[in-house]
Image: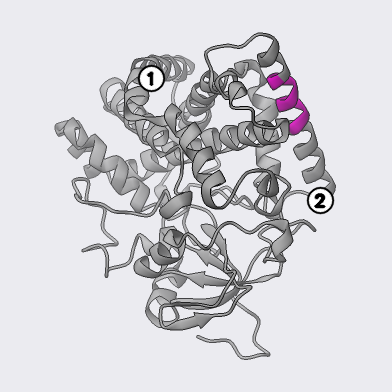
């Protein structure tokens, strides 16, 4: 599978025939070419890593971090700058060492188990209201538009003290900033500028009149405004886009085989492990996590030279038979389940306690309120979101 100089490199991410099924290349690459050269949407070359141990090793190594514009790394997007992963935000937020640890520790106080448990009743009430609204409009309905998208937006807006009425504006900006093939460089620059101005205005308002929210709480830390703005933008994008997509994908996976839904109805105590298994089996997770190798590094028996952009496919790694028995099967009670859906190491997803809580709450409420829920179209007719760094479904048609 190693290409010759004349062969075009495989294009990553790979195409799939179905929105819920993994591309065949994942298993192929894991077995035959676990450290492979691929071309990204930009046309730039990256090194794709697909085995569980290798992905975990690269992500956990503190020497390597997300590429910055100074690294001359591979660009994910087909725009000149390469999208959000190569944007100015990457230079503003601390990516290394003590400064990064302090930044994470400061934000981490907002994502403790205690805080998440305190948010549960409000999340459940919001989920119930959204489901009632969906039902009132009549079946079939779009569960993504009606429940999966608005719930995480409402939660992160509440945590950041952002007016919920502005959600359509920042949803558009985050769509543009996460794009790999959909928007021009000028559109990306405009979205980043407008989002920055919006967040700057919001922070100025918090200085004048602090509230009970994350941004207000960060003001006494003395962070410069660009760092506050980048943090706010990062939390808003990460706090709604990935979770909204994951809620829809999780429900689709559980309804695609009706016996899974029935098993959860019979034993709701499986909700927690079912959420983890849905995260592990996500076949439509997006591009993965990039790491820039600042020195030579051996992984999977291959020495990667300094200057390599490594693309770690957590989703491919999560189906590695070396790490998970019956890895291709959905086991709702799988435990332990050390999947890599949230990454690993110092850059593992900061908001994973929030995402887990939202996924659990939505699933609990759906099982209770809509036990007869089912897909309104065959699973293989579900349509993927194309051209974004985060994978998802365009809509989730359901009836009850």
> Relative to 375, is 273 on the left or the right?
left
Q: Secondary structure at mark 1?
A: helix
Given this view, does label 2 or label 1 mark the residue nearer the observer? 1
Along the line of sight, the residue nearer the viewer: 316 or 205: 205
Q: Residues within 10 Å of mark 2 (few under 14, many from 20)?
A: some
Q: Determine whether 8 is above or below 125 in the image.
A: below
In the image, which disc is placed on residue 185?
Answer: 2
Q: How far across and down, in percent of the image, does residue 236 sit?
A: 59, 32
Q: Quadrant of residue 55?
A: bottom left
- Left or right relative to 184: residue 55: left
User: Is residue 269 on the magenta stretch?
Assistant: no
The outermost residue toward the left is 266
**Residue 308 placement (x, y as % from top left):** 60, 73
Instruction: Specify which label sits upstream in the sequence, 2 or 1.
Output: 1
- Horizontally, residue 300 falls left or right of residue 144, namely left
Majority SS type along the magenta span: helix
In the rendered structure, which segment of residues is drawn in magenta? 196-203
**Viewer can see residue 2:** yes
Q: Which residue is mark 1?
A: 119
């Amino acid at each position: 599978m190693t290409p010759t100089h004349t062969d075009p490199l495989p294009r990553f991410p790979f195409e799939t025939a179905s929105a819920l099924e993994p591309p065949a290349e994942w298993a192929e690459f894991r077995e035959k070419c676990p450290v492979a050269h691929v071309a990204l949407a930009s046309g730039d070359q990256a090194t794709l890593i697909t085995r569980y141990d290798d992905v975990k090793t690269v992500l956990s190594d503190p020497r390597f971090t997300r590429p910055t514009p100074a690294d001359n790394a591979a660009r994910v997007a087909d725009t000149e700058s390469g999208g959000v992963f190569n944007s100015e935000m990457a230079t503003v937020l601390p990516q290394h060492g003590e400064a990064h640890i302090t930044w994470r520790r400061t934000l981490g106080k907002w994502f403790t188990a205690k805080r998440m448990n305190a948010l549960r009743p409000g999340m459940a009430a919001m989920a119930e209201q959204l489901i009632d609204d969906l039902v009132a409009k009549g079946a079939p309905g779009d569960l993504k538009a009606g429940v999966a998208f608005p719930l995480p937006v409402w939660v992160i807006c509440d945590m950041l003290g952002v007016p919920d009425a502005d959600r359509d504006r920042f949803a558009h900006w985050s769509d543009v900033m996460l794009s790999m093939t959909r928007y021009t460089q000028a559109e990306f620059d405009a979205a980043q500028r407008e989002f920055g101005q919006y967040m700057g205005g919001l922070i100025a308002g918090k200085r004048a009149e602090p509230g009970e929210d994350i941004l207000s709480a960060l003001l006494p830390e003395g962070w410069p405004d660009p760092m506050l703005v980048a943090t706010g933008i990062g939390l808003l994008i990460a706090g709604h886009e990935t979770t909204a997509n994951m809620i829809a994908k999780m429900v689709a996976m559980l309804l695609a085989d009706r016996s899974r839904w029935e098993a959860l109805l019979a034993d709701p105590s499986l909700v927690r492990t079912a959420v983890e298994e849905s995260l592990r089996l996500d076949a439509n997770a997006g591009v993965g996590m990039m790491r820039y190798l600042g020195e030579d590094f051996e992984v999977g028996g291959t020495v990667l030279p300094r200057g390599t952009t490594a693309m770690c496919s957590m989703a491919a790694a999560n189906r590695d038979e070396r790490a998970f028995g019956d890895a291709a099967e959905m086991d709702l009670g799988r435990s332990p389940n050390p999947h890599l859906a949230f990454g690993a190491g110092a850059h593992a997803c900061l908001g994973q306690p929030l995402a887990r809580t939202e996924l659990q709450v939505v699933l609990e409420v759906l099982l209770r309120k809509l036990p007869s829920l089912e897909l309104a179209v065959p699973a293989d007719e579900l349509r993927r979101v194309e051209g974004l760094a985060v994978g998802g479904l365009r809509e989730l048609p359901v009836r009850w």
